[in-house]
Amino acid sequence: MKFLITLSRTSHHSRSGGSMLAVLLSVAFLGPSLAYAQLPPGPGRDLTIQICGKCHSPERATALHQDARQWQLTVSKMIGLGAQGTDDQFETIIQYLAKNFGGGGRPPVNINDATAVELEWALDLTRPESRVVVQYRTEHGPFKTIDDLRNIQGLDFKQVEARKAHVTFGSN
């Protein structure tokens, strides 16, 4: 399969495209042994670590849940940004990611223990927004209701409110 590079200069500035791209472009300093521990076994695991792990940690991919077509678009974007491999290698990676981190919609996220990456994806927040939520939670304690998030400066509360069905509060 040939991969189409579909990255436009403005697509990475949109809210949904920006969130995904920000997640996938983050640079992590995790070693290969930790990467192996976080990814399920199967065909494509080693290639995913070898090729994708050059720029980001497995946590970045495992926070996303996309179908095969969405993974293909994501991988095409990464190719456009410099990821190197053969078409066969990228196809194997897409199949591995789709099988192990496939679609099914966005699962609910516990706002009181989610990482910034999980908040970014589940609530379609920007990287800075997800960080201020985590910082606020660290400084002020767990959230009890969705309205508690209104107090966070730098957070588009309307965005959170629109996705409130995806927010849980766990046991406070």
Image (tube, grey):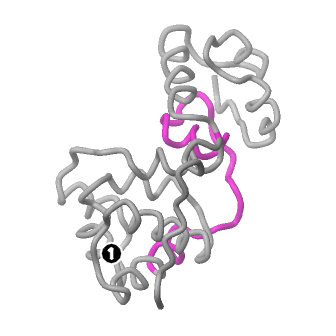
Identify the residue at image location x=74%, y=31%: 160
Could you tell me residue 20's position as x and y percent?
54, 51
Is 122 in front, or is 17?
Answer: 17
Identify the residue at image location x=36%, y=44%: 26
Could you tell me residue 163's position as x and y percent?
78, 39
Could you tell me residue 151's position as x and y percent?
69, 9
| Residue 9 falls within the magenta-colored stretch | no
Instruction: Tell me the quarter of the picture where residue 8 sits.
Output: bottom right
In the displayed structure, 162 sits above or below 151; it is below
Is 42 in front, or is 55?
Answer: 55
Q: On the rendered image, what quadrant is the C terminus found in?
A: top right
In the displayed structure, 6 sits above or below 15; it is below
Q: Which residues are magenta?
A: 96-124
In the displayed structure, 138 sits above or below 30; it is above
Q: Is residue 114 left or right of residue 80?
A: right
Q: Residues within 10 Å of mark 1 (few under 14, many from 20)?
A: some
In the displayed structure, 160 sits above or below 17; it is above
Which amino acid, mark 1?
Answer: Arg
Identify the residue at image location x=65%, y=33%: 170
**Which residue in the protein does label 1 denote?**
45
